[in-house]
Amino acid sequence: MRRRALLGAALGAGLCGRGLATPAPEAGLREMGPIPGLPRSALWSWRSPRQPEAHHRIQLAWPEGPPPSAGWPLVFLLDGPATFPLAVEALRQPAGGRPGPAVLAGLGYPEEPPRDPGGRNRDYTPPAADAPHGFGGAELFLDVLRHEIQPAIARRHPVDAGRLAMLGHSYGGLCVLYAFFSRPDWLWAGVAASPSIWWNQGTLLRTAEPFLAAPPPGTRHRRLFLCAGSEEEPPLDRPGLTPERRARLAQNRMVSRAQEMTGRLAALGEEAPDLAFRVFEGETHGSVVAPATREGMRFLLG
């Protein structure tokens, strides 16, 4: 019942303009009470006045007991309806060896009106002059996380600004990589599961190139975990693959692209971040979310 209650709650964030110097007023925040069946939790609705068409929700969960002197780590979980309950379960399991405590913020979009059906396409894809209509809004999305959502969370729960992490899958994994490369002074660690590096003919690579050519100071103190499921890139000669499926697999190259990105980062040598890469055997693009989230939380907070 608890898993069903968690999966049923909607999540979110909001959008704001680039270069905002101070947190936006909380006029866009509506606190909707605790998440049913989950102690130490809250559900927020967030509407940013800077982008009225965006409607986001946030699921929050925080640890029991007093925080450390620097505050708790804060983990943003993209596609929160899927990843938030898995992350909560990983952190609150009774068995030993679980990840350390953290504040979790699951981000998503409401299922009831007013909906935001194109929200993840808009928010999780990098800006590009040739981006399709309704895509390419990650710059604004990350700004609102940094300048609106994070300060609002910090006013209620002490968080360590130096241990800000993000976990995402598919377009969400693409957004994690974009944040890692474009905001080295903000995002400490990331988990990019099945990242859609292929999107828009590899727009992400244009952001990565300056980073890879000259890693920003402190890169070796950051962390990044890339992963994918083996069934996301099966052999192209496998019987039963339709021509359309074979062409899509050849274009996306989910496993190979993630592995290549890991290799390029590892080639930075002493300046490379703390890296991990894993292929989850037998997992598809959809089924890999669960093991990637569990393993990702251990990587971030273990």
Image (tube, rainbow, N blue to C red):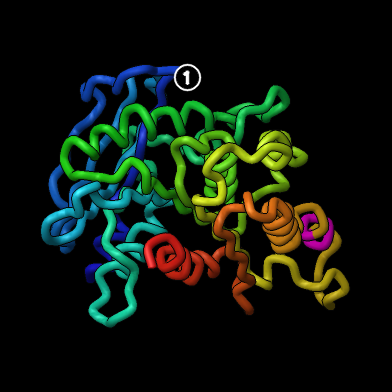
Residue 268 in the image: x percent, y percent? 69, 51
Closer to the camera in the image, 145 or 201 = 145
Q: Is residue 83 shown left or right of residue 71?
A: right
Q: Residue furthest front?
A: 270
> Magenta span covers which residues?
245-249
Is residue 92 at least partly visible in the picture? Answer: yes
Q: How many marks?
A: 1
> Measured along the vertical axis of the image, is residue 181 above or below residue 5?
above
Residue 41 in the image: x percent, y percent? 18, 53
Residue under the point 82% across and 73% down: 235
Residue under the point 56% across and 51% down: 220
Corner quadrant of residue 252: bottom right
Residue 247 in the magenta stretch? The answer is yes
Please identify the quadrant where the N terminus is shown. bottom left
> Measured along the vertical axis of the image, is residue 132 above or below residue 75?
above
Residue 118 in the magenta stretch? The answer is no
Is residue 204 at least partly visible in the picture? Answer: no
Please identify the quadrant where the C terminus is shown. bottom left
Closer to the camera in the image, 95 or 114 = 95
Task: Name the residue tied to disc 1.
Answer: 18
Q: Amino acid at mark 1?
A: Arg
Majority secondary structure in the magenta region: helix
